[in-house]
Amino acid sequence: MTSTDPIRSVLDGQLDRFEELIAASHESVWRCVAGIGLDRETTRDVVQEAFVEAYRQIDTFDPDKDFGAWVRGIGRNLARKEIRRRSCHYRHQERYRQHISQRFEKAEEPDERLAALRRCRERLNPDARAVIDRYYAEDQPIDGIAASLKRSAAATKQLLWRARMALRKCIEAQPEVAT
Amino acid sequence: MKRLHELCLRLMDGELPPAEAEELDAIIAADPAAEARFLELMDLHHGLIALAPETPDTRRVMQRVWRSEASAALRSVRSRVRRRRSRPRTSVLPLALAAVALVAVGLVTLAVTGRDRPVAPITVPVAEGPIESPATDAAVARAQFADGGERRLEPGSRIAVDQPTRVHRLADATVAALEPGAVLVIDGAASWTLVAGRGSWSVAAQAPDSPYVVALPHGRVTVLGTAFDLEATPGWSEIRMLSGRVSVRASGSGETRELAAGETLRLDVRSFVDPDPALLAAWDFTAEAAPLVDTRSGWALEPEAPERIELGSAGLRLREPVRLVSREAGAAISRAIRERDAFSVVLRLVPDTGEPDFDIRRVGAARILSLSTDSHQRNLTIGQGEMRAGWEALSVRLRHAGGHSNGLPAVVVPGGMAGAVAFDLLVSYDRQGGLRIYRDGSLIEQRADLGSLVDWSGSMPLVIGGEIGVPADEMRPWTGTIQHLRIFDRAMAPQDLQSQDE
């Protein structure tokens, strides 16, 4: 009998259905790993590795549990190892590494912070939201964003900066987010 | 605070050179409020990255999984089967069935998820239908297909499989597990030929006076009782020993070598090939067959617009803006180099004369070769042209500990790309010697003050001809001709390359 649940199908040997599990939980794993404070490159590496590791350990997974939460846990551990592995030549790199390592110690979940950030992003004016979305969501370079907004690169950088400052002020004003 | 904000902005955009990085350090060390603001801004920046997840590359994940897991599983079961066979009166049937199941699962998974590396184009004519077989001689083998079908094979049969297939020798328990795309000829009861593709052989013990032989395009494997993997391509054939010993004869030279468990031997049309173990990838763009396929590991460079490249005896001609990309090669090369903390890139190329169509003062050098994801993030770029040094300058951007994730500031060699005739470029790095750049065997630049490559990303594609991750009109295209490209995970000197080429 073929199971319609991809988890049970994978555990039954239909390994190709693991791709469905990746597609379904990728976004939450990405948010968890990126929310720790790794750059985009490293986040991509760690998220992929988390799914590879989950596949390797799939026989240990309880199908009644939340698969996404399980992979997020694997991703968090891999992110911790990556943070420890990295060299920090500059003080600001080392200080940020300490800052995000402390999050691990406190077992902080990034969901609250990200929820506040999402709300604040919705409140940006259209121009500011456009430049934030193109830079972060579409990963466009400044030159490309400037061309599409018909502005100079310098003006676009200024707009991006003002958008970030507006977000920072908005987050500070959110009472439920720890700063 | 204004200066802090300016520096943080540059840091987020990947444009903070070392001097300003030190200035940032001084600011946050002197003022706790500045440090707190710095951490807030970094949290904000990374939070926005977190809110913008990328589209998952599920295929890539599955390829990585298959490569690591199935190989280990197959070898493990095969070794258990062989141990059981050595004990008399022990039934190996359950383990053999497990081996069959694992091979079938593994190969079916490979068929579903796709190959983890491309197979060079094969020019061997393939018969219509899966099997050609002359009539009437008794079958000496049996093909068992992944879809459940079976066919008995007589001497002279030729099979070209498009699904995982196990071919059993009827005289004993010898079996070849063929991957889709393999072409096998049953010459006789004890002699088969792998014409093209890949397969894993598990061979029963043979009597000394009746050996089992598998022929390859460039040699012949005489089985002395063992298990091995074979691969046949137009340019080379390879034998990877899993257990036991075989004798391999090179067709070109007539030389014979024995191969033991754990060893790999490669043959080409001339004889045995002994590549430098540090060689990660090699492209000969002047080759007649499959010039875009690396001869070391089989990675294919894919042009985004094939009509814009020319391939011939002169090499890879880039006359118009076009990028050639291999994500698989880039990731594997980046990881290997990061692990060894050393590399060499060897290019033979001819740049076009004349200034480019884009403004190098605004967007930087034309990209000849990169390991990068966009204009802000790279492991390495070798390029032509820099703002202050002009169009004939050679530019090398290298990501290293203590430096910038965009490889800035570049190492610039004025005149390093001058001339309209072919020249050899060697860019090498290790912790002891730093970065060294040679042109036609002469050292033209050396930089010793660079950190390690420990921060290299393990997922950047290899790109030839332009920057990736930017619109087509922003790609900083390089035009000219590349004849050869080799990449190593150790620092080479010109004399090392000379001894290899002899």
Image (cartoon, coloured by chain):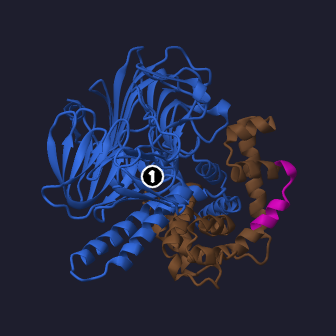
Chain colours: A brown, B blue
Vertical placement of residue A115 versus B399, above or below: below
User: Front-most of B277 and B40?
Assistant: B277
Considering only vertical position in the picture, is B485 above or below B143? above
Residue type of the residue flagged with mark 1:
Trp
Task: From the image, give the main secondary structure of the stretch colored magenta.
Answer: helix
Residue for point 29% across, 42% down: B491
For the N terminus of chain B, the quadrant is bottom right
Q: In the displayed structure, does residue B118 sit left or right of residue B296?
A: right
Q: Where is residue A54 in the image (x, y as percent from the top left)?
A: 53, 72
A67 over B473 or under it: above or below: below
Chain ID of residue with mark 1: B
* A89 part of magenta stretch: no
- Residue sitting at 47 percent across and 38 percent down? B126
Question: Is residue B321 something that shows in the picture?
Answer: no
Circle 1 — which element? loop
Q: Which of B318 and B373 is in front in this view?
A: B318
Q: To which residue does mark 1 refer?
A: B456
Q: Quadrant of residue B323?
A: top right
Q: How many numbered dots are placed on residues in this image?
A: 1
